């Protein structure tokens, strides 16, 4: 099941970008070790013993380990970044990332709907899992740039 969680380094970047969603697992920072969160059950989940942790509760020793789907949702909801992972005819995978904003949609309409402006594209990845990880890395890179641009305005 560990393959469903973001790796340590990418989890660190999500924390830097402001990710504060509840997670099922966390990393012990000194050892970069993934562990299930063993806190108290969340309110209403006493029967299942389900508990979650959030980055706001941690200083430097622990960080949350988001699921891939949580990370993709974060980039969509916070940074308006959408992605496609596509299997090509040769069996390899490609990743395309675009912005989901009014300006982007207007640009497409202005050019007759035949315009596809990727902010980033990665091709010739050998597995879906490799494509997911590369997609997350590109989303992190683009989000860090957007954050930097906001600070410079």
Image (cartoon, helix red, strand yellow):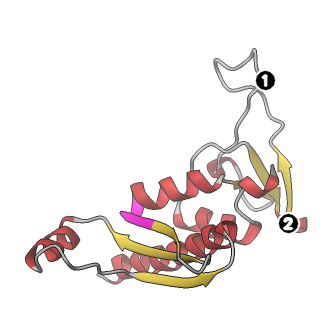
Q: Give coordinates of residue 117: x percent, y percent.
A: 30, 81
| Residue at left offset 47%, top offset 83% | 121
Left or right of 110 in this view: 66: right
Image position, residue 54 (x, y; %): 65, 46
Is 80 one of the magenta-colored residues?
A: yes
- Which residue is identified by label 2? 32
Image: 127 above or below 28? below
State the residue at coordinates (61%, 67%). Answer: 132
Q: Secondary structure at mark 1?
A: loop
Residue 25 relative to residue 150: left or right: right
- Residue at figure coordinates x 58%, y 68% from the top left: 16
Whichever of labels 2 and 1 marks the residue nearer the N terminus, that label is 2
Q: Which is nearer the eye, 18 or 136?
A: 136
Q: In x, y percent, where is residue 127?
A: 68, 72
Disc 2 from disc 1: Cα separation: 25 Å
Query: Would you say 7 lies left or right of 103 here?
Result: right
Find out whether residue 123 is within the magenta segment. Answer: no
Q: Which residues are magenta?
A: 78-83
Q: Quick one: 109 or 86, which is closer to the camera?
A: 86
Q: Where 18 sits versus 41, above or below? A: below
Please identify the quadrant where the C terminus is shown: bottom left
Q: Which residue is mark 1?
A: 49
Q: Is residue 63 visible?
A: no
């Amino acid at each position: 099941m560990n393959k469903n969680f973001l790796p340590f380094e990418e989890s660190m970047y999500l924390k830097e970008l402001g990710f504060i969603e509840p997670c099922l697992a966390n990393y012990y920072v000194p050892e970069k070790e993934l562990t299930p969160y063993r806190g108290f059950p969340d309110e209403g989940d006493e029967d299942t013993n389900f508990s979650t942790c959030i980055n706001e509760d941690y200083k430097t020793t622990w960080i949350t380990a988001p699921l891939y789907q949580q990370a993709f949702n974060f980039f969509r909801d916070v940074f308006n970044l959408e992605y496609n992972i596509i299997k090509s005819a040769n069996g390899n995978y490609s990743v395309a990332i675009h912005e989901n904003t009014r300006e982007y949609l207007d640009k497409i309409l202005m050019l007759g709907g035949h315009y596809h402006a990727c902010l980033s594209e990665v091709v010739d990845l050998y597995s879906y899992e490799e494509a997911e990880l590369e997609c997350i890395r590109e989303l992190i890179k683009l989000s860090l740039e957007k954050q930097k641009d906001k600070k410079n305005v």
